[in-house]
Amino acid sequence: MSADHHTPQSLVPGELVACGLTADAAERLAVQLNRYADRPPEQSWPEIFRTLLGPDLPPGVYASAHRYIFRDWPTERGPRPAWLPSEEQLRHSNVAKLLTDLKFGSYAELYEWSIRDKARFWDTMIRGYLNIRFRTPYSAVLDSQSAAHRPRWLPGATLNIADSCFQAPGDTVAVRFGGPDRMIHEWTVAELEDLTDRVAAGLAQIGLMPGDPVAIDMPMTAESVAIYLGIVRAGCVAVSIADSFAPAEIATRLRIGKAKAIFTQDVIDRGGKRLPLYAKVCEAKAPRAIVVACDGKIAEELRQGDLEWEDFLAALPHPSPLPEGEGAVGAGDSASTTSFRSIARSPHDPTNYLFSSGTTGDPKAIVWNQVTPIRAATDGFVHQDIRAGDVVCWPTNLGWMMGPWLIYASLINRATIALFQDAPTGRPFGQFVADARVTMLGVVPSLISTWKNTDCMAGLDWSAVRSLSSTGECSNAADMLWLTARAGYKPVVEYCGGTELGGGYVVGTVVQPQVPAAFSTPVVGTELVILTEDGKPTDSGEMFLVPPSIGMSLELVTENHDAVYYAGTPRGPNGETLRRHGDHVERLAGGYLCVQGRVDDTMNLGGIKVSSAEIERVIGRVADVRESAAIAVPPPGGGPSRLIMFVVLKAGAPQVAGSEWFEQLKPRLQEAIRTDLNPLFHIYEVVIVESLPRTASNKVMRRELRAQYQAGQHGPH
């Protein structure tokens, strides 16, 4: 049927054939979709997914159907949503509970209250929903005499935040884990707490004191969860190191963190390969190591003074419960009977040094304190909708903020952590999601792209998944539509923040429509403003945060915190102190927000933040390279950034494209990154240039290189 301005255009079967359907299937689906032509898309789209669009159609079908159903969506309503909440979400989510309990009529009212009356909001979350446990209660939520950029949270309180991770009944499951063999193992809350206590006691046994830094360089395992919480419970500070780092980067983090001991694993079993880890730790000249065996027996001889995990535990008498009244006391609770009396600390005492990208070559060491996990747990409760009894899976590592986030957001909310003991890139991970009955699945966009392009998840039952969340990189709309369908029409809550925030700053909820690659709201308790270069409010510019908010860092280990986040920032529209974050944000119609990338020289690669300087420092060691510049650009359709290297060669280096030397240049640069930085960072293209554009003060103009590359002015080599 022909279309005019009165008649909606019909979906042509040929478009669906081009997506991969057979001619017959395309004809049937086109006829069925065209029956919805005159219905409002927000009503028809959920029904179409429930009745017509199963999880195993060719990926392009979802995008094609989405374009058709929302073809007349008015621009003033913002981007076209991929998912809309059902009555069940509106009635039974954590946000719905908050709205009912606090007598708000909408999420917008809840958010406005959370930034207008921050003290009451945080008090409500701490006592009313998270039940954070204190040894000594706080006299106020926020010291009213403290400056916005130097807030004093919970004055008068003492606590150990690890205590709040064991509030669920002891016989409930705390950690569910498995690998490609499909064997599912479980630790109860009581078992996890017992091992946590033994780790804490063991640290004291080998002479470590509260406040001492203790590194952890391990894959995300049940043991590493207990080790992390044991370090915190002992009053020590976890120095987080990702298991993918090269020895030089491990050494840098040990040096900055001043670690006095390290927990690690002998090898990592990944994709059928045994990758060395303890050997890298030794090459980094790490302090005394406690080494966990990957498969029950240490794969190599240990250095003198290092301990096998079992020997570390066996050297201790098995802890027994303390007498009545000797445990940590929760707010309004009776005394617990934990077997190790956790070390009570002040709210601002450190618990964790986490490393984020620095712009000078060395990573920033960001201090998480006893209060920071409250932000992670609040985000999980409000935005990821984590509930008691849920099973939360998010492939990550304790070297990145999402590792500690996963621990706190799951356990404080009385949910189970689900850990897959291998790479999450293939079908075995998807099978684990099904077998472990995961209810909240976290992802990074590049992972989704891999799943979609390899069709490795076909036929799997993800019906237990209630919601998903994506963080770390820019999303691709087509990939997110595919993921929504793969889980049986479930929301993908986009989540963007930073290590220095303990969580997010823009996000979604399960009571709002979700748009791929866009955010429906700032995070509760967090206010932001968008400014032009001359400090005027705008809908597209640099985003600044309005402190204070729980989770925002107050300290860096080796750098001046105020200089990094506050020096030279403008005042807010009402004269507020503003905190620098470094993202370019655009406010879209309908109240949505879109993160356009960094305004500084950092980038997200595979969900990991890294600075251009860190990459260039490694590339600069390669023979024949005089200087280089690293930039990140999104692919034409949007999605995870690609790493582009601009290289200036030394005099005398071969300059002729096509030569054997020239063809080996990119692999040589990639090998340098793999061995000296991180094998997860992949170079997309190398561009040879005669010189790099610089400012009058000799700074490399990476923005100009990015603009030139995207305009096609440079060709790859």
Image (tube, rainbow, N blue to C red):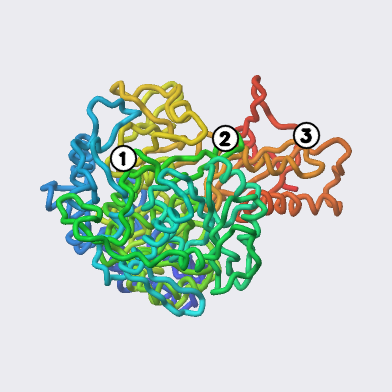
- Residue 598 lies, in percent from the top left, at 50, 38
Say which of marks 3 and 1 sits in front. 1
Is 671 left or right of 654, judged from the image as shown? left
- What's under tag 2, amino acid-wise? Thr
Relative to 71, is 454 above or below? below
User: Helix, strand, or loop for circle 3?
Assistant: loop
Q: Which residue is mark 1?
A: 346
Front residue of this view, candidates 681 and 555: 555
Residue at 30% over, 42% down = 591
- Residue 686 lies, in percent from the top left, at 71, 46
Q: Which residue is mark 2?
A: 359
Front residue of this view, candidates 648 and 615: 615
Front residue of this view, candidates 54 and 695: 695
Say which of marks 2 and 3 sits in front. 2
- What's under tag 1, amino acid-wise? Ser
Front residue of this view, candidates 386 and 155: 155
Q: Which residue is mark 3?
A: 690
User: Helix, strand, or loop for circle 2?
Assistant: loop
Relative to 336, is 648 above or below? above
Relative to 698, is 364 above or below? below
Using a 10 Å C-alpha cutoff, classify the residue at mark 3 as few (fewer than 14 neighbours), some (14 to 19) or many (20 or more).
few
CB contact under 8 Å: marks 2 and 3: no
